[in-house]
C-alpha cells in the first residue's frame, strides 16, 4: 500500500453493468448524470487573473479570452457539469479551460500533457468516467425522436387533397 494509506486500484476500471457488483469498494455506487443540462454556465472565475507565457507573447489577450469563454460554455453543457456543480469545481474547470486554450496556441508537450491529466480529473473521457463511477442517463427525448417513424412519402395531389378537404 502506498504512503498515506491510499489504495491504488490496478486492473480495468469498474463496469456498472457487471453481473457481480457486491464488492465492498462499490458501497458508494454509481452517479447517473443527466444526458442534457439546461443550466447556464457559471460566471468565469478567472476574469481578473491574467496568465502570460513567454512563448505566447504575440497572441491577442482578447482573442484568447473569447476562446476561453467558448470552451467554458461548451464544457458546462456536458453531463459532467452536473457533478462539477455539486462539488463546486468551477475553478478547476476554468484552469482546465485555460490549459486547453494555451495548448491550442502553443502545442507544448508539457501543456498538452497537463491538459490531458486535467481532463482525466474532470471525468471528460470514458475511462475517467468509469473511475469516477459516473454514467450518463439515456436521453429519453432524443430516443423518442429517433424512434418516431418518418412520415410516409405522399404525392403533391394527396397532400392538396388533405388540405382542401378531399376535393
Image (tube, rainbow, N blue to C red):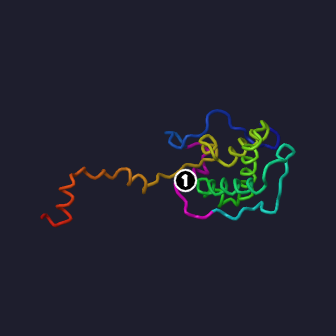
Q: Is residue 34 magenta?
A: yes
Report which quarter residue 162 is drawn in.
bottom left
Quadrant (top left, top right, bottom left, bottom right) of the N terminus: top right
Q: Residue furthest right?
A: 54
What residue does disc 1 label? Answer: 32
Question: In this view of the protein, which residue sits in the foreground, 82 or 1?
Answer: 82
Question: In this view of the protein, which residue sits in the foreground, 154 or 76?
Answer: 154
Q: Position of residue 12 (x, y in %)?
A: 61, 34
Quadrant (top left, top right, bottom left, bottom right) of the C terminus: bottom left
Question: In this view of the protein, which residue sits in the foreground, 1 or 87?
Answer: 87
The kind of secondary structure element at disc 1 is strand
Which residue is at 82% across, 40% downward?
Answer: 3
Q: Position of residue 114 (x, y in %)?
A: 76, 42
Q: Position of residue 94 (x, y in %)?
A: 73, 55
Report which quarter residue 140 is drawn in.
bottom left
Q: Is residue 29 magenta?
A: yes
Instruction: Look at the picture and state if 106 lies above or below 77.
Output: above
How many numbered dots are placed on residues in this image?
A: 1
Which residue is at 72% across, 62% downward?
Answer: 44
Q: Residue furthest top?
A: 11
Report which quarter residue 2 is drawn in.
top right
For residue 1, side relative to residue 136 (left or right): right
Q: Residue furthest bottom?
A: 165
Predominant secondary structure, magenta span: loop
Over which residues does the magenta segment extend?
Answer: 22-40
Mark 1 crowd level (few <14, some 14–19, many ≥20, 10 Å Cα): some
For residue 104, side relative to residue 152 (left or right): right
For residue 36, side relative to residue 125 (left or right): left
Amino acid at each position: 500500500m502506498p504512503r498515506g494509506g491510499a489504495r491504488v486500484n490496478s486492473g480495468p476500471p469498474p463496469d456498472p453493468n457487471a453481473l457481480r457488483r457486491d464488492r465492498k469498494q462499490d458501497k458508494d455506487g454509481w452517479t447517473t448524470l443527466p444526458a442534457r443540462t439546461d443550466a447556464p454556465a457559471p460566471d468565469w472565475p478567472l476574469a481578473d487573473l491574467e496568465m502570460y507565457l513567454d512563448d505566447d507573447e504575440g497572441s491577442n489577450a482578447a482573442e484568447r479570452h473569447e476562446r476561453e469563454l467558448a470552451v467554458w460554455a461548451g464544457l458546462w453543457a456536458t453531463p459532467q457539469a452536473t457533478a462539477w456543480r455539486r462539488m463546486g469545481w468551477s475553478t478547476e474547470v476554468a484552469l482546465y479551460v485555460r490549459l486547453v486554450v494555451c495548448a491550442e496556441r502553443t502545442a507544448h508537450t508539457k501543456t498538452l500533457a497537463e491538459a490531458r491529466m486535467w481532463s482525466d480529473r474532470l471525468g471528460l473521457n470514458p475511462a475517467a468516467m468509469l473511475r469516477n463511477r459516473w454514467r450518463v442517463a439515456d436521453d429519453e427525448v432524443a430516443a423518442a425522436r429517433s424512434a418516431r417513424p418518418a412520415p410516409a412519402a405522399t404525392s403533391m395531389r394527396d397532400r392538396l387533397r388533405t388540405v382542401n378537404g378531399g376535393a
